Image (cartoon, coloured by chain):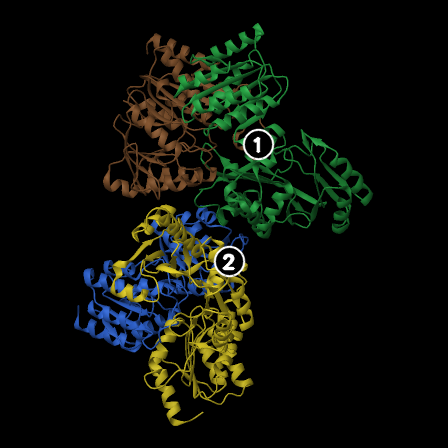
Chain colours: A blue, B brown, C green, D yellow
Amino acid sequence: MSILVKADTKVVVHGITGRIGNRQTRLMLDYGTKISAGVTPGRGGEEVWGVPVYDSVSEVIEEHSIDASLVFVPAPFAKDTCFEAMEAGVKLIVLITEHVPVHDAMEIRAMANAEEAVVIGPTTPGIIYPGKMKIGIMPGNMFCPGNVGLISRSGTLTYEIAGNLCDMGIGQSTAVGMGADPVVCTSLTQLLHMFEEDEETHLVVIVGEVGGTEEEKAAQYIKREMKKPVVAYIAGQSVPPGKRMGHAGAIVERGMGSAQSKVRVLKEAGVKVAERPTEVSELVKSILRRGL
Amino acid sequence: MSILVKADTKVVVHGITGRIGNRQTRLMLDYGTKISAGVTPGRGGEEVWGVPVYDSVSEVIEEHSIDASLVFVPAPFAKDTCFEAMEAGVKLIVLITEHVPVHDAMEIRAMANAEEAVVIGPTTPGIIYPGKMKIGIMPGNMFCPGNVGLISRSGTLTYEIAGNLCDMGIGQSTAVGMGADPVVCTSLTQLLHMFEEDEETHLVVIVGEVGGTEEEKAAQYIKREMKKPVVAYIAGQSVPPGKRMGHAGAIVERGMGSAQSKVRVLKEAGVKVAERPTEVSELVKSILRRGL
Amino acid sequence: MRIHEYEAKKLFREFKIPIPRGGLATSPGEAHRVAEEIGLPVTIKAQVLVGGRGKAGGIKFAEDLGEVRELSCELLDMDIKGYKVESILVEEKLEIERELYLGVTIDGSRGCPIVMVSSEGGVEIEETARNCPEKIFSREVKPSQGLRAYQARKLAKKLGFKGKPMLQLAGVISSLYQVFKSYDALMAEINPLVMTRREDLIAADGVLEIDDSALFRHPELGIEAQDRIPDELEREARKIGVSYVNMDGDIGLICSGAGLGMATMDMIREKMKPANFLETGGGMTRELMAGALRVVLKKGNLKAVFINIYGGINPIHEGAKGIADVVREENVKIPIVAKALGNLQEETWETLQGVGIKVVKETQTARAIEQLFRTLEKGCG
Amino acid sequence: MRIHEYEAKKLFREFKIPIPRGGLATSPGEAHRVAEEIGLPVTIKAQVLVGGRGKAGGIKFAEDLGEVRELSCELLDMDIKGYKVESILVEEKLEIERELYLGVTIDGSRGCPIVMVSSEGGVEIEETARNCPEKIFSREVKPSQGLRAYQARKLAKKLGFKGKPMLQLAGVISSLYQVFKSYDALMAEINPLVMTRREDLIAADGVLEIDDSALFRHPELGIEAQDRIPDELEREARKIGVSYVNMDGDIGLICSGAGLGMATMDMIREKMKPANFLETGGGMTRELMAGALRVVLKKGNLKAVFINIYGGINPIHEGAKGIADVVREENVKIPIVAKALGNLQEETWETLQGVGIKVVKETQTARAIEQLFRTLEKGCG
């Protein structure tokens, strides 16, 4: 099994006629993803790699069954696109788009909560169920099937860590990029919970980074509720404290947010924390070897 | 019994320190209404006729139990006041204020639906349970206890019709002013339904007026579901069609909205329609005499 | 409150709705200058706050500058449905391929805004609404949420638009909703929205009706609702704070409450004709009632004044003092019949009777009106 | 993107937040004129896009006009934390009774705005947050709903305010939220909000941090984010469309992805020092990569360049061509080590190797960095 997606999850691609949408559709089709349709307002009636294009989601659902939306539209249109998909009843949205205004991200997150939909992103590489399908932009050749759940705030660093795991013969059940924007629509803790419930996942890897308090919140959850082992790496140990943005951010974070803080609380929660990316696969291997 | 209120419904008066709030509080106390508290931001700690004044509803509910809000605040603050009351859990709001912006009224109505609260008004004289209590501004001496439910879009015309009924020995179970603004927060149909369910009400009187389509919608309900007899009067038979406000209103109303249209559809639904206000009490009397 | 076409179009343009090139003129000379600047032929449109202007001859087309002067002159001399034409809008004449209808208004019974579109724009839209309602597509809008872009596109597609023109039409629909919402409108309408031969969409006409009760939120408009009332007495009444409608009879009327006022008028019309409709609203004071009576009396040749008020929210005993003040000061000779009930009715009666007003103490307005009729038949003052 | 204090205050005033009387000056003469106009004594504040200005000596008080000239001169000559002072704000000196703190920011983990107030305003607020968090009151705001007036009043009451001052404070809190929302801010802050001896509330300082990604919605601000970057190379990189942070080492760095970039930097720092952090984002093209390498090379005395890119959303085979272009055109002599994996990696490798770049084909960045270290130890180009 996998989290969030299945082998035959049916996907609609928003912004399919754009340069990136077009290219990534080809790569996903090659990887085995079932893409039912694309949406680009004003381009209804066209085709992209044999996938029919519609003007709106509501036209798509008249003709196709849809499980997930993959969004490549430019940032100014991201909010409207997510709202459209959710109003049409789509319960899983992968929002690849970068530079979505934070106020829009907050509204998308609020609507997702209200509609009980899951929105991954913004600024996510997406979701991959290795060997079966992917909804996103990650290079398929860096992942392989297995029992490690992978959650990452970065895109490319995930590829590296997945690649390292594969090199050591350790595959992934599902890998999810949660996005690194100040507000993401699905939290690290929510994703940990999904992996905790997933039978095929034996261990979870977190690839975190400096900033925000997602890792700190997740540490509380791990300590309190998680039974599966967790390995983490936090990027940005050497990042000097950024230019201060007034007091408000500091008050909210109350001393959290630094890489050091994240490493400390994760360790306190029993997580094995790697010093460098390479070490992740070694820690995973040693835990799996001990047999859980 | 009565609809919406009981003899001991506990009321908080918003805008109690204003000229009208102060005066009407005195009149309501004299009539028997249980007023627990008043709210005027910035005037917390004062008293009005022995009623304690608070800065906010949340402070009121820490000290008192509250069933209903009565709102006298100036129009620009009506929306915020209703939102505050609903957020604090108040489920019945009587919004007396005139000249509330229509866009605000729409938002209040939407929140009332979401919160499952009942908002009567805006521009309503309120609710009276004759002989027991009133939440509103109607002169108590024009009403008397009995079994006729009274729903009115006008204020003062209601007093007249209630007075006529009383003169003929016919009392009212409850009288409710629904307000005459383009958007009211509780519809005629909703109020008819409450009276239909109320055991103490034997007959319902509707005092309608030209404009809008409330009476037309209500006629459908009466025809389809109502068992109790209904008597109506529609004010504005002689009103010349107003200055036309573009096409949009006419498209929405599709030929409805005139006094003539209302009289016709109500008659088709089996309602006895009075030609002039005086006739209302005569029609009621003849129906009640026949014994239901 | 309806604002002028040229004012509405200015607001439309702020929200990126394309409007014809043009300018406002208050004299034939100005019209000439505008036409010269934008080029011929031009459309010249009377700016009046009332619909049906086209059928009333308020829209002209000019091919040359001589015609511009001549037709401007003609329009600036016109009265349309009682409204004096004080300015004209001179605009490029559009090359019309199709005429669409776009409107946003409030559906009172559903309590939310409603957006309507039709491919049958132009003056016959109301007939279309009556006879072919299936040609008008509409959708409700959640007030707290607004009209979303994809919802606007869905409406545009219903009119059979595709590709870029569909996106352009959806953009205009979204913008019109924005105007409606931003300016607290009761109605925002583009009829016709013209598609030109080059497939551009242009708002050939524009109507915007703003909620008087929300004007306090829009000081940027610089509009006082009372300034937009053409009837002088109605304008004066508005300044005092009462609703007044001028009518063609000779019985002056003062009522508290619109429903009561209309019912009273309905009954008076059984035998006589009201000179006006006047409704005090819920803010009665001594001064307000004095002002109301003064406005009513300004209309000459009244046979009588009928007052019908209730003491609910209104302190009628204070209002009565205002009435008495005017009767005394202006030495009013025509008969006044009053019915006043509710809180503090006895004090009210006393004040009114003190200046010779005939007070009816019964509940039924019908009885009071009978008293009015009898008084006039007797001819006593 | 942080905007200047004087710009933030202008926006605050639009939303009716009281600010001190004053004016901007870029020379001692202008400062003199402003001080003359508003009257003495005055506060003179360096306008720099960085916090902690007060402690760094960027705020002065002048009692007479001579002092105004002298201190203005001094401030306009200053550098504060690397920012050159180009303008100063001359304002009336407030008679301070109390200093409050108001802030609105985004709580990332809860995904919503958060409003914070404290009666302990002033420079020590962060210490208060650490040591006495109970002195800071906060509330979450639903993004689609906004901060309602009664919610603002509740916060004002938490600071012990009553009566009219409570209403006034609530008004400022509401307005600050409006500013935050209207301008897509990441942070809006008044610290201190001064209560004067006459019980007036005045925003003595103002900070507004606007979301760069939302600037397209605010053409009215007339601000280009890239113009606000003081570092020349960082500004240039921004124009190309990549994130660049200038650092103090000598290994040039180009990575795709911030996380990968940071991890790479962490590992390089185990033995050497990066000259910069550069992250390409997801819009890689041949031109973008060429521009990125040019910016990196502008910094003199580099020992080597390290490239670490993945072909996910990015067409790395196109990016590689841009790298090759620059190496050829600028005849780059220092060693370049590249790791490039993902979609179309083979084509990418070929292009890079074609211009003499050392390509590492293993998955582990650590291995590629070891290769970099080895290359430099050998001293080969």
Image x and y of residue A244, in percent: 38, 70
Label total for image: 2
Image x and y of residue B92, in percent: 32, 33
Of circles 1 and 2, the one toward us is 2
- Under mark 2, the amino acid is Arg
What is the crowding at mark 1: few (fewer than 14 residues within 10 Å), some, or many (at least 20)? Answer: many
At 57% across and 24% down in the image, what residue appears?
C294
| Residue occupied by mark 2 | D217
Is residue D290 toward the left or the right of residue A212 in the image?
A: right
At 58% across and 35% down in the image, what residue appears?
C226
Q: How far apart are marks 1 and 2 (CA)?
A: 38 Å
| Residue occupied by mark 1 | C129
- Under mark 1, the amino acid is Ala
Q: Quadrant of residue C300?
A: top right
Q: Which of B287 and C99 is in front in this view?
A: B287
Is residue D79 toward the left or the right of residue C172 in the image?
A: left
Image position of A83 with respect to D63: above or below: above
Q: Nearer the viewer, residue D67 or A189?
A: D67
